[in-house]
Amino acid sequence: MLYNNAMKIGIYGGTFDPIHNGHISIAKSIRRELGLDIVYFTVAADPPHKSSSERTPGNIRLSMVRAALEGEEGMAASDIELRRDGVSYTVETLHAFKRQYENAELYFIVGEDMLENFPTWYRPGEILSLATLAAAHRPHGSDNMEQVAERIEAEFGGRVLITDVCGPDVSSTDIRNRVFNALPIFGMVPYAAEIIIFERQLYVPQEISAIGAALAKVLDEYRLEHTMLVVREAELLARKYRLDVKKARIAALLHDCAKLNGQQMIEYADARGFELTDEERLYPFLIHARLGAEIARSEYGIEDTEILNAIRRHTLGSEDMTDFDKIIYLADKLEPSRNYRKLGSLRELAYRDMDAAVVAVMRHAINYTKSSGRRVHPMTVRAIEALENKGTL
């Protein structure tokens, strides 16, 4: 998109690690209040106040911002700092924007904390010669922002605007901590950015990232992305039904650890003395659940019977499925990248009635199996019968 120079441009700098709905709410509100033509979310490469070891790589943070802003009017991601080597200083970023938009009126968006620290920034007077500071309030903030603005103007010149905008009470630090502890971030982060967080295994404990790295050596990119989205769905379902969320994360992470192509799975099983049934040799896709439980135990050190059973039962089900088994089964079938006609209604059902959802998904799988000319596995039939005989459907 091309813009002429006679513009009012907002520049919203930050690490955006990750971008969250508070960032977008502030940008929208300030754009509306000040009549800005566009707000550029400028992703920091190396901010002076944060060490690089604490930060997600810039290209991933940029991809989250771009995904989050897709379809948002008057907002765009900028890689201007990522393309520049070294430490990111605001004054250099503003000079770069001025070179590109010589006659534009620049507004640099800051929060209350950043405004209070502004006198310590690199060349603050020069910053104010290039742009107006537009400050947003923080939730439960102080009442002296106007006085802070007056002191800054008196010391450095320029213009500081205190907007009426107050961002929601959410922070990137809180989001990272929540992901680390398998707490939900749904509604705190734009959906597209949340998907990237799970696909790229961001902010998770070292043991989880180590499993993910090992899986990346054996699974193709599609299967690995599917796995990470199953993790997301399993965490949500586990929390909904008050099951162990951290165990659900591990079961989901390893549910497809043996999902290779058919011949590879047969060779893998034979090499390890893993006995296959005639049906599994005929339909190798059936192998990976049973074999996956064995690999999770022998190669990933998982001894928890509940996790191993959930991996073993996630494809065909079982007549003695536990609630934990059911959420892993449903997470596998209903994660967001799945694409079939009844997905939306089945996902809605899964968060309302677990057993009914399992039966509905199994019946959908049976119809697909029959339409493909294959025999319906009796284990799935027995699983449906067991659930229907419970008398809760």
Image: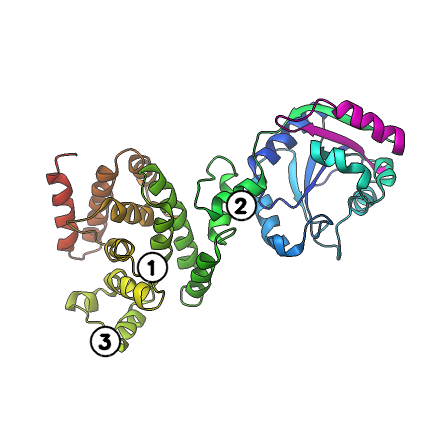
Amino acid on which the number 2 mark rests in the picture: Arg
Say which label, 1 or 2, has the lower sequence index: 2
Give the percent coordinates (x, y) of residue 57. Answer: 61, 55
Mark 3 and mark 2: Cα distance apart in space:
42 Å
Say which label, 3 or 2, has the lower sequence index: 2
Which class describes the residues within 10 Å of circle 3: few (<14), some (14-19), or many (20+)?
A: few
Q: Quadrant of the C terminus?
A: top left
Q: What element carries label 1?
A: loop
Give the percent coordinates (x, y) of residue 346. Answer: 30, 38
Say which label, 3 or 1, has the lower sequence index: 1
Amino acid on which the number 1 mark rests in the picture: Asp
Amino acid on which the number 3 mark rests in the picture: Gly
Residue bearing the label numbered 1: 256
> What residue appears at the point 34 percent right and 42 percent down from the top-left corner?
238
Which class describes the residues within 10 Å of circle 2: few (<14), some (14-19), or many (20+)?
A: some
> What residue appears at the point 35 percent right and 58 percent down from the top-left corner?
254
Give the percent coordinates (x, y) of residue 148. Answer: 79, 27
In this view, 355 is above or below 214: above
In this view, 110 is above or below 267: above
Figure quadrant of residue 376: bottom left
Q: Residue 215 colored magenta?
A: no
Q: Image check: 282 left or right of 33? A: left
Q: Quadrant of the N terminus?
A: top right
Q: Between 385 and 298, which is closer to the camera in this rendering? A: 298
Residue bearing the label numbered 2: 176
Give the residues in magenta. 130-155
Tell me the number on the disc at residue 273.
3
In this view, 336 is above or below 211: above
The mark lying in front, picked from 3 and 1, is 3
Mark 1 and mark 2: Cα distance apart in space:
26 Å
